[in-house]
Image: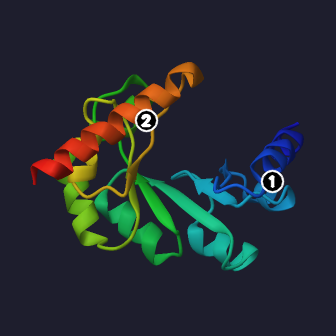
Amino acid sequence: MLFELVSRAVEITRGTSTRLLVNDRADIAAGARADGVHLTTQSLGAATIRQTFGKDFLIGASTHSLAEAIAAHESGADFVVVGPIFETKSKEQYGPPLGLSKLAEVTRALERFPVLALGGISANNANDCLDAGAAGIAGISLFGEPENLKRIVGSIKNQRRESNNER
């Protein structure tokens, strides 16, 4: 069933700028011709995935510390997701929020390597994450309501523009 779902999603995203990654299942991603995989801290390592699926297979890795982010980068991930940055019920099992200062520490240590912020991200704090050096943000609840997606993204973009104009 997962393979069929991914295959259908690949059909929908093919020819667009959207990159489709499958959570934790590189085998399904490769078989369905998705763009790559998003690894959890319990997944096979990025080096194994890179060796098995090649240089063009996009690899993202969830990390919860500077050490994990560096290890993911060094083992061949194309980007890392760091979190939780803020308090959120969905990420409580990963410990207390890292906060913006830890996010900034990771982005400085991995200069020019894409770091995405995750965990408690809202329209009100998304730009704080970008100001801390994050290349982007990820969110479950933030982007979970399709009918509000355009408004939320627009709000974040407007806040970013205003923030950049103030500098």
- Residue type (three-letter) at the residue carrying disc 2: Val
Colour mapping used in the image: rainbow
Q: Which mark is residue 167?
A: none
- In the rendered image, residue 164, in percent from the top left (x then y), is placed at 19, 52
As shown in the figure, which amino acid type bears the numbered disc 1?
Ile
Q: Mark 2: which secondary structure?
A: helix
Q: Quadrant of the C terminus?
A: bottom left
Residue 153 point in image, percent of width and height: 43, 35
* Direction from residue 49 to residue 39 in the image, left or right: left
Q: Quadrant of the N terminus?
A: top right
Q: Is residue 139 visible?
A: yes
| Mark number displayed over residue 28 | 1
Q: Quadrant of residue 96?
A: top left
Task: Identify the residue at image location x=86%, y=59%.
Answer: 31
In the image, 52 versus 152, the foreground residue is 152
Name the residue tied to disc 2. 153
Q: Nearer the viewer, residue 15 or 87?
A: 15
User: Is residue 95 visible in the rendered structure shown here?
Assistant: no
Examine the image and state in which quarter residue 43 appears.
bottom right
